[in-house]
């Protein structure tokens, strides 16, 4: 895989992770802290991101980048006021 394709793939999964975590961050902010729903809002997007990483054959070294995207999405989603 050439560098351009790899960067595009990483940015695509980063964007997917971020956008997927925005609504879950919003829902998490409305849930009671440490409840089952709060826990699920944090962890339900993880399998989708994991599947995307596995299907794209990216190394484990990129996991911190995707964790960062998830945290940013959760935090910004929690600050949304709809």
Image (tube, rainbow, N blue to C red):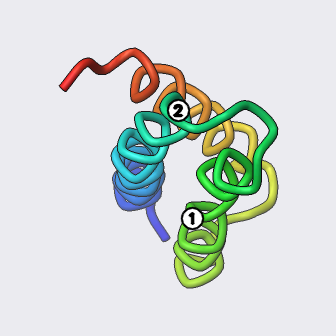
Q: Is residue 20 left or right of residue 33?
A: left
Q: Secondary structure at mark 2?
A: helix
- The residue pinned by badge 2 equals 74
Q: Which residue is nearer to you in this view: 35 or 22? A: 35
Looking at the image, residue 57 lies above or below residue 70: below
Q: What's the residue at 35%, 54% (across, down)? A: 12
Q: Secondary structure at mark 1?
A: helix
Question: Of the numbered discs in the image, which one, if any, rests on residue 15?
Answer: none
Q: Is residue 55 left or right of residue 46?
A: left
Residue 15 locus on image (x, y percent): 36, 46
Q: What's the residue at 74%, 63% (across, down)? A: 59
Q: Which residue is nearer to you in this view: 36 or 53? A: 36
Number of disc labels? 2
Q: Is residue 12 left or right of residue 25?
A: left
Q: Indicate the quadrant where residue 64 lies.
A: top right
Q: Which residue is nearer to you in this view: 60 or 30? A: 30
Measured in 3D between alpha carbons, the distance from the residue under mark 1 to the one under mark 2, in whole angstroms, is 14 Å
* Label 2, residues with CA under 10 Å away: few <14, some 14-19, many ≥20: many
Residue 55 locus on image (x, y percent): 56, 84
Looking at the image, residue 39 lies above or below residue 29: below
Looking at the image, residue 38 lies above or below residue 37: above
- The residue pinned by badge 1 equals 49
């Amino acid at each position: 895989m050439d560098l351009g394709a790899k960067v595009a793939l990483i940015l695509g999964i980063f964007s997917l992770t971020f956008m997927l975590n925005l609504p879950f961050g919003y829902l998490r902010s409305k849930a009671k802290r440490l409840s089952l729903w709060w826990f699920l809002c944090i962890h339900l997007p993880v399998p989708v991101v994991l599947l995307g990483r596995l299907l794209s054959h990216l190394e484990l070294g990129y996991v911190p980048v995707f964790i960062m995207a998830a945290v940013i999405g959760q935090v910004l989603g929690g600050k949304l006021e709809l």
